[in-house]
Amino acid sequence: MRTTSEQGAPALSPGRGTSARAHVVLPAYNEAASLPPLLRRLADVALAERLTAWVVDDGSSDGTAEVVAAGVPGLDLRLVSHPVNLGLGQAVQSGLRAVLAEAAGSDLVVVMDADDTHDPDLLRRLRAEIDAGADVVICSRFVDGGDDATAPPLRRLLSRGAAVLFRRLVRVEGVRDFTSGFRAYRADLLARATRHWGERLIEERGFACMVELLMKLRHCRPVVTEVPLVLRYDRKRGASKIRIARTVGQYLRLLARDRLAPAPHRAL
Ligand SMILES: Nc1nc2c(ncn2[C@@H]2O[C@H](COP(=O)(O)OP(=O)(O)O[C@H]3O[C@H](CO)[C@@H](O)[C@H](O)[C@@H]3O)[C@@H](O)[C@H]2O)c(=O)[nH]1
């Protein structure tokens, strides 16, 4: 296991082609119990997928960092640490920054939940989509074969409401599931967006950061595809951190900010 500083500008080699490595960013806040089974499952796909896992420990108090420091046989595992809790948005941003400092342009950068509710077997499918020409691939609850039937009704309403709202008002071609936390990006797309937005690539601290990232990336005119996600809403350990009223407020604020912010003059 290596511990990585968060500093470092994107240093990517350009050019399209078959994706080489897969970098999996796992934002984690108090996930010491959920991480070990997930990391073992990632180790199972690591060899075939040339995979590095980057856990972003966001000021956890439950020993999440120690779990990562213990390492997992067969898995190239890195730890990015925040000394205090800065929120999901900052954690994703720190993870992406660390990955981009060493990724190649055609690498695959995946962000997925650290609570062991996302299936690492989907990584093969994500790689296939990127290799076929996609810049962003979303694991989606809202395409044929996807669902979130096991989620509580209010949570389903939140995701569906957000999907309808953002589809109407933002429209990113190819996107149905705006709030899914399980996605893959081509590294050079993220690097291009980072060069333009810098630290402002992700300003939302909470769950709205997922939508914000898509909103910013749309200015790069990415090719976006979706693959079905059957969300196993069966968190076996710990509790969900999402607060519904707060998240709705963040979505509305994000929409307002997007309307007011000047769009880049041309595609990035
Ligand atoms: N680093 C960090 N990670 C966090 C924080 N808050 C949450 N996370 C991480 O974000 C992931 C998802 O958090 P959960 O608390 O498990 O939320 P959920 O209810 O499973 O979220 C579901 O709905 C979201 C909105 O639709 C989706 O974005 C998410 O992928 C998932 O489907 C987990 O890995 C959790 O540790 C934070 O403050 N800091």
Image (cartoon, helix red, strand yellow):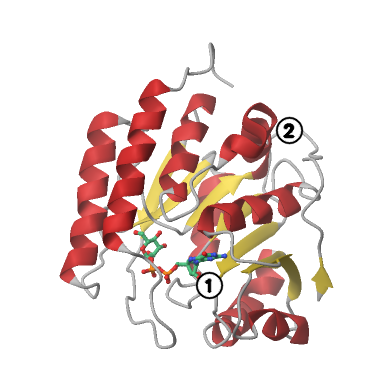
Residue 45 spot, x, y in % from top left: 62, 74
Q: Is residue 248 above or below residue 172?
A: below
Residue 36 spot, x, y in % from top left: 60, 86
**Which quadrant is the N terminus positioned in?**
bottom right
Residue 26 spot, x, y in % from top left: 59, 66
Residue 149 shown left or right of residue 27 in the figure = left
Q: Nearer the viewer, residue 177 or 57?
A: 57
**Amino acid on which the number 2 mark rests in the picture:** Gly
Query: Circle 2: is it few (<14), some (14-19), or many (20+) Cα within 10 Å?
Result: few
Residue in the picture at 38% in, 82% down? 235
Residue 258 sits in quarter: top left
Mark with earlier residue (2, 1)? 2
How many circles with numbers are drawn on the protein? Answer: 2
Residue 42 spot, x, y in % from top left: 61, 76
- Can you see residue 250? yes
Residue 37 shown left or right of residue 209 in the figure = right
Q: Is residue 90 above or below residue 239?
A: above
Query: Circle 1: is it few (<14), some (14-19), or many (20+) Cα within 10 Å?
Result: many
Residue in the picture at 23% in, 75% down? 150
Residue 229 sits in quarter: bottom left
Q: Secondary structure at mark 1?
A: loop
Q: Disc 2 and disc 1: Cα gap in Å?
A: 31 Å
Q: Write down the residue under mark 1.
A: 114
Q: Write down the residue under mark 2.
A: 15
Work out which residue is located at the far top of the displayed protein and give it. 265
**Which quadrant is the C terminus positioned in?**
top right
Q: Nearer the viewer, residue 42 or 36?
A: 36
Quarter of the image where ligand 1 sits: bottom left
**Amino acid on which the number 1 mark rests in the picture:** Ala
Residue in the picture at 54% in, 63% down? 123
Tag in front: 2 or 1: 1
Residue in the picture at 77% in, 45% down? 104
